Image (cartoon, rainbow, N blue to C red):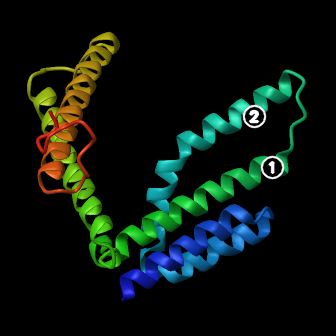
Amino acid sequence: MKDRLLLLGYAVAVIAATAVHDPWWLAGGLLVAAALAGRQAPKIALRAMRAVVFFSLVVSLGYAASGVLGQAVSVDYLILVNIRVFLLIFLTFALAARIDFLRALNFSRSLTYLTTLALSQIITFRRLFEDLRLAAESRRLRRLALRQGYLQSAAAASHLFDRAEHDAREIALAMRARGFFPPQPGTDARGS
């Protein structure tokens, strides 16, 4: 029940953070979220900062560039967007550290099943990504040139996409075999 209440509180906080357009209220919400996070607040804030820094940098620079090109620029709006994004990411990381999503969604068989599938995919791809990174490190004596690094990253990304497509097909077949999807008109039970 605690997990379900935390998830509901998170949903309300996200709706409130997107509905409020005053940076001071959002900053206050961030202080409340940090207080509720307790001792974990600095660690969560650091993770949120790392996750949001590139987004904020690109958006801020793009917005400033539009001002140079003659568009009207509002610094208040830029502050509002950056605080809102940081608050949402902070809330997400704070929730992820405290909630068991399977317990929170156990009121719905379909949501529990979908969450189980998503979590298994996340764990699998995190392990695969780490394996690819370690394999790349073990096969080189010195740092790769930029072009070689791009080629290696492209090959890894291609492998991850192929694996995702394969796994999605296998999961869809398994779900269909367990009766998760209704049969389509004009097909037999095997979907052919």
Alpha carbon separation for disc pair 1 and 2? 10 Å
Using the image, determine if residue 154 lies above or below residue 127: above
Report the residue that reaches farthest toward the bottom.
1
Q: Nearer the viewer, residue 172 or 66?
A: 172
Secondary structure of the residue carrying tag 1 is helix
Task: Name the residue rendered at 30%, 75% in the picture.
Answer: 100
Q: Nearer the viewer, residue 93 or 10?
A: 10
Name the spot of residue 183 as percent of width and height, x first. Answer: 23, 47
Residue identifier under label 2:
63
Indicate the quadrant containing the C terminus: top left, top right, bottom left or bottom right.
top left
Q: Earlier in the sequence, mark 1 or mark 2?
A: 2
Question: Where, by quadrant of the figure, is residue 120 drawn?
Answer: bottom left
Q: Do the residues labelled 1 and 2 touch (CB within 8 Å)?
A: yes
Q: In this view, does 141 lie to the left or right of 181?
A: left
Task: Name the residue rendered at 27%, 42% in the picture.
Answer: 184
Task: Name the residue rendered at 43%, 71% in the picture.
Answer: 95
- Mark on residue 30? none
Q: Is residue 25 left or right of residue 10?
A: right
Local packing at callout 2 (Cα closer than 10 Å; few below 14, some 14-19, many 20+) is some
Name the spot of residue 61 as percent of width and height, x first. Answer: 69, 32
- Mark on residue 77? 1
Indicate the quadrant containing the N terminus: top left, top right, bottom left or bottom right.
bottom left
Q: Is residue 58 left or right of residue 114?
A: right
Question: Where, by quadrant of the figure, is residue 135 drawn?
Answer: top left
Using the image, determine if residue 122 lies above or below residue 94: above
Q: Which of 167 and 16 is in front in this view?
A: 167
Q: Which of 170 and 184 is in front in this view?
A: 184
The amino acid pointed to by label 1 is: Tyr
Local packing at callout 1 (Cα closer than 10 Å; few below 14, some 14-19, many 20+) is some
Name the spot of residue 136 as percent of width and height, x first. Answer: 15, 27
